[in-house]
Image (tube, grey):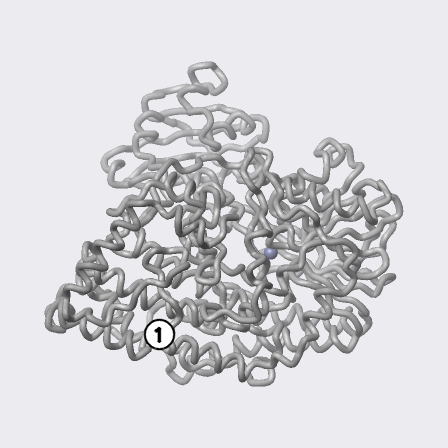
Amino acid sequence: MPTRRQVMVSVPVTATAFALADHFLLDAAPARAQQIDPLQGHFHPKGKAASKFTLDVLKRAQATLPFADTKDFEEQKKGLIAPMKDQKIMADAGHVAWDMQRFQFLDAQDGFDSIHPSLLRQSKLNNNYGLYEVSPGIYQVRGLDLSDITFVRGKTGWIVFDPLVTAEVVRAAWALFQEHVGQGLPVSAVIYSHTHGDHWGGVRGIVDEADVRSGKVPVIAPVDFMDFTVSENVYAGNAMNRRLFFQYGLLLPADPHGYVGQGLGQAVSAGATGLIAPTRYVEKPIEEFAVDGVRMIFQNTPNTEAPREMNTYIPDMKALWMAENVIASLHNIYTLRGAPVRDPLSWSKYIGEALYRFGVDAEVMFASHHWPRWGNERIQEVLRAQRDLYAHMNNQVLHLANQGVTINEIHNVYEVPKGLQEKWFCRGYHGSPQHNSRGVIQRYLGFWDCNPATLIPLSPRDSAPLYVEMMGGTEKIMTRGRQLHDEGKYLLASEIMNKLVQAQPENQAAKDLLADIFEQLGYQQENPGLRNSFLAGAYELRTGIPQGETANSSSPDVIRAMSTELFLNFLGIRMDSRKAEGLRFTMNLITPDTGETFIVELENATLTNIKGFQASKPDLTLTVNRSDLELTMMGAKTLEAQIADGTAKVQGDPGLLKQLAGTMVDFDPRFEIMPGTKAQKPELSAYVESGILGHADPYEAVPRQTIAE
Ligand SMILES: [Zn+2]
């Protein structure tokens, strides 16, 4: 990890020259006489220091939050057996899969002008990096990924809960564990607590698929696990991947003025993702059975933090595993990268049930992120507060909505009760009260605030020119925007500057001022997703969107987890219907190895499919084994090639498949979010070489369709 000085030195020459030229122009304009100089040592040549208004916000937080309560630090440290020695873990592909060196600056100072003290506190807590005892027989390796991996002693070996995101970091965790505790015993079972990729993606680093197939190592998961592992992320996957650049700050370097962690953990590892399908499903709401001789009671909690998730109680150890349902943070009801809004009431009720079923007896509680809680009193305190946190958010937001508060106001009206605000583990390090409260209204009432003026609004770029005209033109807006910025009224400033940028995407001075405004708003946020989104917006306004080759590899395991129906549905989304006007066909699809049949029809510029049917007079019948079709699903082999070498058989007119292929679009995650950011086209390679990027290649670092949470 280069120092900040090295990064500054290595910033691409073009960007620096651009900044200097722009600065000269700004100085020449009287309206911008108060232009603040860039901060020496900031990773970006246009980056600014925290303003006195931002410092005031951070100081107020420092003075009012319960910093005297240091219990989390005791719990986070407790049970340390050995720290991880290597700061970096390499990926098999040659790049760095994990790097804790880049987060060491967090511990070098008590406070930073540009980091909210509560977020800094959480990031310092997430700097734990090693092997810990949870209780005799239960161990965790923390800090090797966004999530934790847990080992529970079974009769013959180790039961693994939630094997991280990628195989390389799981192997490193297993090696550390074996060095100190494991006694050379093998993995005897794997449990996936839920469907998100940071809880199964590294499984191939710790278990051989042959042992799973032979029944030697059972893999246990909540019912319908495979149906939901990828389905949440396929249809809108490209948009979600792009939005991750904001929520997870993928272009931001780890730096006091950039990325400072993700709240759930420091970051997502960038190695190889895989998936081995479960061999045993927990189907009933509550199910008890022994896993490698250890009695376990599973509680299914569907539609909570994930579509399918389960808690586990180990009665003989009085140990309660709360999966990701209870962590050291308010979780997301609405996820900024985009996902169907979750159900906070059902989430709260499952926590309540866990409290009364297990929590009254438990002596230790642990989860897939953060650190454990010890002692029944503490466990009950955390469970009760978390139960109330989600229920309150549901109830009070709807209470206010029933009195006319809209989705556009709720985040300014809704407040978490004071008593919960004072509990660190209820603060917003993943979900925030602001975006979650809007999410609750979205869940129940949708996007519309019921004001007809917002019912069919003009697109921002179409309405913005009139605003600019009516506000008196560019210079007036720049002057007022600068003034509001200088007065610390950043939200008002962003409101008018956004109009100018929407109207004039090529106006770099306007984009730079809006970036300065976003940057201060970013520094002020306690929530890392909000911070990253503002700072990512500032970054792209200043620099543009890096261009270059994007990785186009999907994990074969993940493709295998995708049902044929899901794949066909997604083809309907990939099809540009404007290219399909006037085309019409009916196709029978047969996959003999899985015994599935479909009718696929193109009509009215729409591609549909229906499973379990065959048309009597199809224009085309395609017969291909699902196992062969997977190569096409991965993009490794075209359907034409499958037909040419006889792998796929066609009856009827094969030209129709060619026509269909001609309507398909490959989605590109480099689309523009802020206006005028694509035109700048900086080469991705320059940024990779400069070390300015948060990831070796952000387009590669995004695990395709295995988005962590
Ligand atoms: Zn997770």
**In the visual, does 428 lie left or right of 74?**
left
Answer whether residue 604 is visible to the viewer in this image.
no
At which x and y percent is residue 701?
49, 44
**Mark 1 secondary-structure assignment:** loop
Tell me where residue 111 appears, x and y as whole percent: 53, 71
Q: Is residue 273 visible?
A: yes
Choose between 415 and 600: the one closer to the eye.
415
Three-letter amino acid code of the residue under disc 1: Asn
> What is the quadrant of residue 373 in the picture?
bottom right
Q: Residue at x 37, y 69 (%)?
A: 520
Rendered view: 325 above or below 651? below
Residue sitting at the far top: 645
Which residue bears the numbered disc 1? Answer: 408
Q: Split into 4 quadrants, where in the image is the C terminus?
A: bottom right
Task: Find residue 542 and report its horizontal and vertical position in percent.
Answer: 30, 56
Q: Nearer the viewer, residue 301 or 55?
A: 55
- The picture places residue 396, in percent across and down from the top left corner, at 50, 81
